[in-house]
Amino acid sequence: MSDRSELDLRIEIAEGKPPRDLRKRVERHLAAGELVALPTETVYGIAARADSPEALERLRALKGRDAARALSWHVASREVVERFDELRPLARRLAARYWPGPLTLVLHGVPEGLEGLASDGWLGVRLPANLTTQGVIEGLDFAVCLSSANKSGGQPCTSGPAVEQLFGDDLALVVDGGPSRLGESSGVLKLGRGQFELLREGLLPIEDLRRIAGLRLGFCCTGNTCRSPMAEGLALRLIAERLGVAGPRERQAVAEFGFEISSFGTFASPGARASSYTLDVLAQRDIALSEHASTPATPELVRELDQVYCLTRSHLDALKAMLPPGRAKKLALLDPDGRDIADPIGGSLAVYEQCGDAILRALEAHASDWA
């Protein structure tokens, strides 16, 4: 830190863990409801105490921002996604990949004390990558929000001097961490039931976000005409229901969240239709799989998937034999208790229904890991 006096507005600091005296100074200003500019890897932000209506009003007035517009909660840990219930597995995967970093997740639900940041029950959350700002936030015993350092509709500031020039004495302190590394606002993704919408692209294309948020799931039996197509159809419906997009176009709808569901067989002949009883069992649940064509399992197909569930131990062993050593972690039995799900081929509709019920119970045991 420079040798500037305590009364100076702008304090220069190299990025890294902030000194204790700086952290305490920022804490003192924010606790009193004052505004402090902090660096992030994208642009500079103006910080305010998130549970202080007066501080939030001061922030909005400074920026000339509509009082109804949401503000983003800035955090120091990925664990905050556990405080939101909707589509938590997707939020976890996105946070694991992109936090700390230039992604704001707009999630449904508002933790207590943060009502002043939210809009219609949705709240933006971000873990910035700047180590100084992370260290400041981590040491606080109250939540903070950061809003880009700009007047409403203007370009955000990417340096401490620019913040000082624009806002002057309206701020209690400007923590100057040098020029912003990226110089562009974070991407903003709205994620909840029925919602996967990129509100602001930033540096992250929506295709990349879908790929990380969703999963490519495969189901494997022998001929890919009875059990694995049943598992595919039931899994598709289960995931669509959890995402809030069940309906006639649910395969396309779950793809909007990054999910791909497929099935194949260890001894499948290419192009065979699903058995009539399999289609009947699915039709009872209003699931259509009439265009199904059986697909043989191949190493290339398996490698493209995030997780493969096998209906029996023999299917699991067959797939393991296809893959190089160390590549079988993505393979598992569908039944979480390690039981085989017997082949209904040659049986009555009732036998197929019992098979479908067993598959559905197994799928439900995994669903909370998917969506």
Image: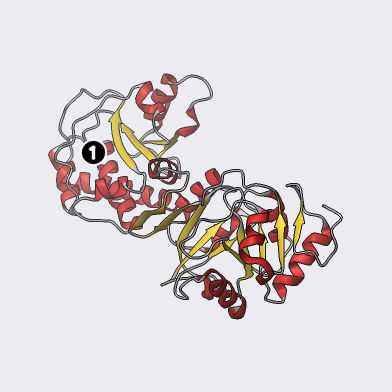
**Residue 137 x/y as whole percent:** 68, 60
**Residue 214 x/y as whole percent:** 40, 45
**Residue 224 x/y as whole percent:** 25, 31
Name the residue that disc number 1 marks. 344
Query: Left or right: 123 with respect to 256?
Result: right
Residue at 25 percent across and 42 percent down: it is 230
**Residue 16 x/y as whole percent:** 75, 47
41 to 347, vertically: above or below = below
- The crowding category of the residue bearing disc 1, from other C-alpha atoms within 10 Å (few below 14, some 14 to 19, many at least 20), is some
Residue at 87 percent across and 55 percent down: it is 3
52 to 368, vertically: above or below = below
Which of the 4 image quarters holds residue 169?
bottom right
Name the outermost residue toward the front: 165
Q: Is mark 1 on a helix, strand or loop?
A: loop
Q: Can residue 314 be seen in this view?
A: no
Residue at 21 percent across and 29 percent down: it is 294
Dot 1 amino acid type: Pro
Q: Is residue 43 visible?
A: yes
Q: Which of 304 and 23 is in front in this view?
A: 23
196 to 6, vertically: above or below = above
